[in-house]
Amino acid sequence: MSAIAEYRNESWYSLGLIEPPNRTEYFEMTTNLLVAFYSTYGHVHRMALAVAEGAESVPDTAVRLRRIAEPLRAGRM
């Protein structure tokens, strides 16, 4: 018997000490999605908007769109 199977057989669930979690509650949770992007001319911004729009069409999904500041170049430090 593997260590994982042995652990499951001797777990608190099998001993009746605690109730196993209700698996359906995990499916009712809201999915949070962060769409982070950096765009100079607006092309990537439009793609990020499209990604966010598509993700918002999925039920129980919260989407945040965040623009990343301009990255530092090697000579600007």
Image (cartoon, rainbow, N blue to C red):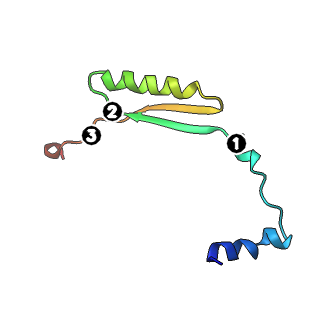
Q: Is residue 17 above or below residue 74?
A: below
Where on the picture, by quarter, is residue 13? Answer: bottom right
What residue does disc 1 label?
27
* Residue at 85 percent of width and 71 percent of height: 17
Where on the picture, by quarter, is residue 14? Answer: bottom right
Circle number at residue 38: 2
Q: CA distance from mark 2 to mark 1?
A: 32 Å
Where on the picture, by quarter, is residue 41? Answer: top left
Amino acid residing under circle 1: Phe
* Quadrant holding the N terminus: bottom right
Q: Residues within 10 Å of mark 2 (few under 14, many from 20)?
A: some
Q: Earlier in the sequence, mark 2 or mark 3?
A: 2
* Residue at 36 percent of width and 35 percent of height: 68
Residue nearest the observer in this picture, 61 or 11:
11
- Asked if the residue under mark 3 is in contact with the one under mark 2, i.e. CB atoms within 8 Å, the reply is yes
Look at the numbered disc 3 and give the secondary structure of its residue: loop
Circle number at residue 71: 3
Q: Is residue 68 left or right of residue 76?
A: right
Amino acid residing under circle 2: Tyr
Q: Is residue 31 left or right of residue 73?
A: right
Comparing marks 2 and 3, which lies closer to the viewer?
A: 2
Amino acid residing under circle 3: Pro
- Residue 5: % across, % down: 67, 72
Q: CA distance from mark 3 to mark 1?
A: 38 Å
Q: Is residue 66 left or right of residue 55?
A: left
- Residue 53: % across, % down: 51, 23
Q: Is residue 44 above or below residue 17?
A: above
